[in-house]
Structures are given as structure tokens and as C-alpha cells.
Image (spheres, grey):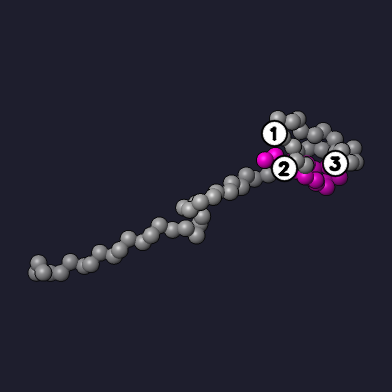
Amino acid sequence: MVPVYVYRREDGSTFELQQRMTEDSLVRCPTTGQRVERVLQPFAPRFKGTGFYSTDHRKPKPEEQPKRAGGE
């Protein structure tokens, strides 16, 4: 899987580009020739499987029966 990077042009517009992590970041926009800078994006991990989602909860423990007085 190749990551998608977001770049911002001098005029404030942005574009996305698929690049390998080993490639150097762009200096100029390939379509307009404007200077660009890479925009850092927040990392959003995607967990697969059970136990990772906020809707997943542990199974509730069975409630303990209250102890009766008198040793019964």
C-alpha cells in the first residue's frame, strides 16, 4: 500500500499525491509549478478484529448474590 500525502500550494489550495515513503517530498506542484509544502495529517489507525472498537465492551460479570444473614 502506498501512502497518500497532502500538499499545499502557495495560493493555499491543496492536492493529494500517492508517493512511496522513500521518495523525496515535492518542491513544486506538477500541474501549476507553484512551490508546495507537505501538510502533516493526523494518523488514524484502523484496527481490525474484536476488542478495538469503542462499541466493544467486556462481557459484564454476573452479579454476586447478596449474602444472607444467619448463615443460610
Front position among marks 3 and 1:
1
Decide if residue 48 is in sight here.
yes
Taking the magenta stretch, the answer to whether it contains residue 6 is yes
Q: Quadrant of residue 71?
A: bottom left
Residue identifier under label 1: 21
Name the residue at 87% across, 38% down: 30
Q: Are marks 3 and 2 in contact (CB under 8 Å)?
A: no
In the image, the segment drawn in magenta is: 1-16
Name the residue at 78% across, 37% down: 37
Front position among marks 3 and 2:
2
Marks 1 and 2 sit apart, C-alpha to C-alpha, by 10 Å
Q: Give residue 10's mark.
A: 3
Secondary-structure class at tag 1? loop
Above or below, comparing residue 7 to residue 51 in the picture = above
Marks 3 and 1 sit apart, C-alpha to C-alpha, by 23 Å
The three-letter amino acid code for the residue at tag 2 is Val
**Residue 3 image point, x, y percent:** 69, 40
Decide if residue 40 is in sight here.
no
Q: Give residue 4's mark.
A: 2
Q: Quadrant of the N terminus?
A: top right
The three-letter amino acid code for the residue at tag 1 is Met
Q: Residue furthest left?
A: 70
Q: Is tag 3's residue or tag 1's residue first in the polypeptide sequence? A: 3
Q: Quadrant of the C terminus?
A: bottom left
Q: Are marks 1 and 2 in contact (CB under 8 Å)?
A: no
Name the residue at 29% across, 65% down: 63
